[in-house]
């Protein structure tokens, strides 16, 4: 059973607007959460992470929010740029990393 | 450093054939991971090694799959016999520490097509 779910396979956003990517999880024992970004024909690369003891972590245009009561994680990209177009994977750690299915983000110029 | 190196980048084979995927991790990384990416399940961890020793192979789908790490700079993932449902992109990743304590660095992947 999928412990980490990204229910939106794709998202399309206009350049300059906010992109919000969502992730839900079921295991309350996860202690660390990460987002990876993947371009075509390349491997995923680390983007941003958050510990379960925090509810927000910011790095430039990227902010990750954690709502533990709802078991929900989100990644905000503001402002979105065409170069942000990629597949985004959320991942959660319980000894090892468990990844979601990925969301394809398209940022239109 | 060249990063994680995988070969081949593409593999097309016929059902029943043996397939071997190769990975060279980043020098000095103690952990090596094999993942499989499919549309339905996203990135699935198949197996990971620590200091060349398999630690968790619970993600290996069937006995047809096997992985080895004979030394710190080389690992293989073998599928024998291959089946069409094995078609996917297989990634190798390495890190200094397991899980999210340290960033996992991924290779470019091997796209496997089994006809």
Image (cartoon, rainbow, N blue to C red):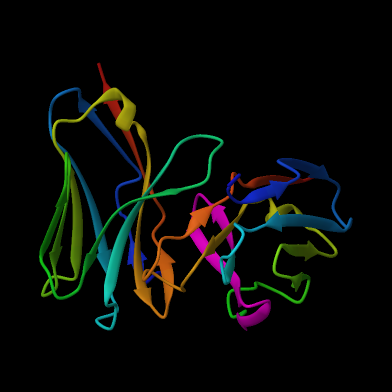
Residue B66 visible? The answer is no
The image quarter in which residue B50 lies? bottom right
Q: Where in the figure is residue B38, as x and y percent of width and height?
A: 55, 52
For the C terminus of chain B, the quadrant is top right
Identity of the residue drawn at 42% across and 68% down: A98
Location of residue A109 with respect to B71 vertically, above or below:
above
The residue located at (63%, 58%) in the rendering is B25
> In this view, which residue lies farthest toward the top?
A109
Q: Residue at x 50, y 49 (%)?
A: B39
| In-image side of B112 versus B82 (left or right) | left
Horizontal side of A98 relative to A34 (left or right) equals: right
Q: Which residues are magenta?
A: B34-55
- Residue A83 lies, with reference to residue B5, above or below; the image says above
Q: Is residue B110 left or right of residue B48?
A: right
Task: Out of A44 and A21, give the one closest to the viewer.
Answer: A44
Above or below — where is B47 with respect to A60?
below
Up the image or down, A45 lies above or below B73; here it is above
The residue lying at 50 percent from left, 34 percent from top is A40
Q: Give the image quarter of residue B20.
A: bottom right
Report the magenta stretch's main SS: strand
Magenta span contains residue A103: no
The x, y position of residue A63, in whole percent, is 15, 49
Q: Position of residue A33 (x, y in %)?
A: 28, 66
Residue A39 in percent (x, y) is at: 45, 36
């Amino acid at each position: 059973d999928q412990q980490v779910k990204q229910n939106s396979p794709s998202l399309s956003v206009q350049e300059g607007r906010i992109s919000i990517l969502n992730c839900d999880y079921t295991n309350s024992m996860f202690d660390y959460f990460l987002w990876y970004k993947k371009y075509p024909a390349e491997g995923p690369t680390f983007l941003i992470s958050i510990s379960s003891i925090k509810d927000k972590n910011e790095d430039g245009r990227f902010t990750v929010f954690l709502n533990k009561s709802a078991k929900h994680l989100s990644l905000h990209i503001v402002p979105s740029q065409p170069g942000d177009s990629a597949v985004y994977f959320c991942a959660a750690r319980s000894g090892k990393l468990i990844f979601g299915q990925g969301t394809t983000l398209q940022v239109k110029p | 450093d060249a990063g994680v190196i995988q070969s081949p980048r593409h593999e097309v084979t016929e059902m029943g054939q043996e397939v071997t995927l190769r990975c060279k991790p980043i020098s000095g990384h103690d952990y090596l991971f094999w993942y499989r990416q499919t549309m339905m399940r996203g990135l699935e961890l198949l197996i990971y090694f620590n200091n060349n020793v398999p630690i968790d192979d619970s993600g290996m789908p069937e006995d047809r799959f096997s992985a080895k790490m004979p030394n710190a700079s080389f690992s293989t993932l073998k599928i024998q016999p291959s089946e069409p449902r094995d078609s996917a992109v297989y990634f190798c990743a390495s890190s200094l520490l397991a899980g999210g304590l340290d960033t996992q660095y991924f290779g470019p992947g091997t796209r496997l097509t089994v006809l």
